[in-house]
């Protein structure tokens, strides 16, 4: 005869899952204020540097396109 699998209650599974979630949440270590401030500064710096590089690339390509268009219309 086939093995009978023990069926557990849906609510029992849900409560077990929630208990495990709470257990995992207790393991979390949050960063300190100084770590958060330092990380914020690094992110802000990377965003600013990236923005300046993208702006410079955009302006350079726009100037190059302007030179190409002027050369093409002169001839």
Image (tube, grey):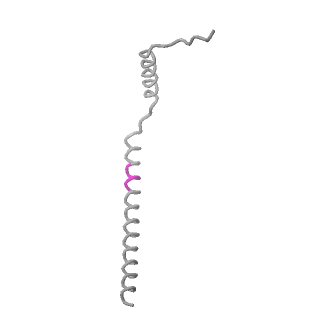
Extreme-front residue of the structure: 1
Q: Is residue 21 left or right of residue 6?
A: left
Q: Position of residue 1 (x, y in %)?
A: 63, 9
Vertical placement of 16 versus 73: above or below? Answer: above
Q: Position of residue 12 (x, y in %)?
A: 44, 15
Main SS category, magenta section: helix
Residue at horizontal 42%, vertical 24%? 22
Vertical placement of 10 versus 24: above or below? Answer: above
Of residue 22 and residue 63, the one placed in the foreground of this image is 63
Extreme-bottom residue of the structure: 75
Residue at horizontal 41%, vertical 66%? 53
Of residue 18 and residue 31, the one placed in the foreground of this image is 18
Image quarter in which the C terminus is found: bottom left
Of residue 25 and residue 57, the one placed in the foreground of this image is 57
Vertical placement of 41 versus 22: above or below? Answer: below
- Which of the 4 image quarters holds residue 14? top left
The magenta segment is: 40-44
Magenta-span inclusion, residue 43: yes
Q: Position of residue 13 (x, y in %)?
A: 45, 18
Residue at horizontal 39%, vertical 65%? 54
Magenta-span inclusion, residue 73: no
Vertical placement of 42 versus 49: above or below? Answer: above
Residue at horizontal 39%, vertical 77%? 65
């Amino acid at each position: 005869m086939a093995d009978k699998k023990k069926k557990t209650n849906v609510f029992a599974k849900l409560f077990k899952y929630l208990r495990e979630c709470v257990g995992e949440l207790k393991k979390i270590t949050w960063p300190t204020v100084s770590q958060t401030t330092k990380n914020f500064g690094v992110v802000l710096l990377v965003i600013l540097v990236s923005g300046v590089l993208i702006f410079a690339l955009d302006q350079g390509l726009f100037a190059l396109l302007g030179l190409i268009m002027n050369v093409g219309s002169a001839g």
